[in-house]
Amino acid sequence: MQAFVIAAPASGSGKTTVTLALLAALRRRGLKVAPFKVGPDFIDPGHHAAASGRVSRNLDAWMCGAAGVQRSFALGCAGAEVAVIEGVMGLFDGADGGSEAGSTAAVAKLLNAPVILVIDAKGQARSVAALIKGFSEFDPALMVAGIILNRVASPRHAELLRAAHASVPGLPPLLGVLPREPQVALPERYLGLVTAEVAPENVVFYERLAEWFEAGVDVDGLLKGSSLPPFQGEGRGGDGFDAVFLVNAQDQAHPHPNLPLEGEGTKTIVTPPGGMELDKVRIAVARDEAFSFCYPENLELLEAAGAEIEFFSPLRNHHLPAGISGLYLPGGYPELYAPQLAANLPLLQAIRTAASAGMPIYAECGGLIYLSGGVDGAASDHLQPFVALFPAWARMLPQRKALGYRQVTFRFDTILGPAGTVARGHEFHYSEVVIAAEVPRSYALSRADGQVLEDEGYVLNNVLASYVHLHFASHPALAASLVESCRRWNGP
């Protein structure tokens, strides 16, 4: 198949806009395109899904290891003709300043995928040639297959840039220039772009993106230089991930309920290890504009372990789905919908009742806020009361509170696994939760560089809540433990 990585020298160069425009252009040509995102981000993959009609998967070697990246890539490519991988930050930026760990370059080399470098050409002329030369030669093991110059100010600016590129022999080919166009920009807010659930995800918008891209870039030339060598992923490994997935060619978990995907109505086909037949347990998963941050593999691993996923909306549904044995509250933007969430009193009470009865409940980031007493400084000027399972409340801050990879080690047994379990994830939020000291903390937490952080992972009966978005593929037994915890619970 064909595949390439959309990368840039730095954040803010227009990678996401170019990726979305390319996805839309390829889809308009009738190609089945598999989108991916390097790193832990949730927001960009949602937009990828809207543009391509297929689920976008994260490729993150720090959280899931090299074999995990290869597996996710193979799963996402099922039935596709082209793979488009959006990078993260600058091409060589990763978990630390001294290595390529967690970088776009590392993932590109792992998959043998060529790189298309998107350069913000604003304020540059001949200097752009020096930039291209440096990035294309920095790592001889990396193939920079082409250049796209973005935010070009005028036809005269484009002439200068083309001349600069032509003046230096041996540079990767210039695939095209994209003019500065405010109408193709996506709106942003404090965590980056707005989510796909509320962005302008209509046909006209993506047609405009595709036309803008095709007018400035040689799409056929891009495709000719993007052939991927035969996939050499191991498929199996010594991390407990064996025999988990068998995925059909139509695609996988739905990114959000309002977006029709190609192959809608098909199901992910999963088999438990060893082919054992397990009793299904129904787990309710929150999914709407307020709760949309969930890695596809988390849900697929739950299904593989015997879960039947039932989506519901805390914004619209007044009751939990019938017959469930567990509850998963992913992250998102509950603070932006605080009045609506607080007004849904029947659902708040239903969650309290379920927790009191011992139902396993797992919550991440926005889910943690939702289980607190409420959030202050959000969509209104006063505290909006939420579920109040924990003696805690959340408040929004003017500056970012936390950002980075996290490794967690379970200090004692939880619904996700026994003491000593080690898993990896990511943390990114502008809020903080003020919580009573007596609430048990099950996570020994550390950063990617090993620096120890304050214990986290709040526990109350069978409820586990944390700011950390765990990637279940970092330790696949997490999903099996959660399903087994739900299976052991007999109900109220």
Image: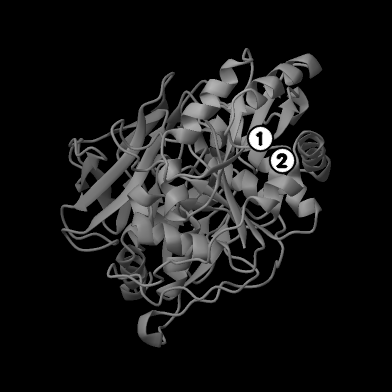
Left or right of 208 in this view: 228? left
Expressed as whole percent of the image width and height from the top left, the position of residue 232 reads 45, 67
- Name the kind of residue labelled 2 in the image: Ala
Q: Nearer the viewer, residue 463 or 373?
A: 463
Badge 1 is on which residue? Answer: 17
Image position of 235 with respect to 223: above or below? below
Real-space Cα distance between discs 1 and 2? 6 Å
Q: Pick the quarter of the image with the N terminus.
A: bottom right
Q: Are marks 1 and 2 in contact (CB under 8 Å)?
A: yes
Image position of 188 with respect to 220: above or below? above
Expressed as whole percent of the image width and height from the top left, the position of residue 53 reads 70, 56
Q: Residue furthest top?
A: 123
Expressed as whole percent of the image width and height from the top left, the position of residue 18 reads 66, 37
Badge 2 is on which residue? Answer: 21
Image position of 68 with respect to 62: above or below? below
Q: Nearer the viewer, residue 372 or 97?
A: 97
Q: Determine whether the residue tagged by mark 2 lies in a helix, strand or loop.
A: helix
Answer yes or no: is residue 348 visible.
yes
Q: Is the residue marked by circle 2 packed among few (<14), some (14-19), or many (20+) residues within 10 Å?
A: many
The residue at the point 67 percent across, 31 percent down is 186
- Name the kind of residue labelled 1 in the image: Thr
Q: Quadrant of residue 65?
A: bottom left
The residue at the point 75 percent across, 48 percent down is 220
Left or right of 67 in this view: 47? right
The residue at the point 29 percent across, 43 percent down is 406
Q: Nearer the viewer, residue 120 or 402?
A: 120
Left or right of 334 in this view: 54? right
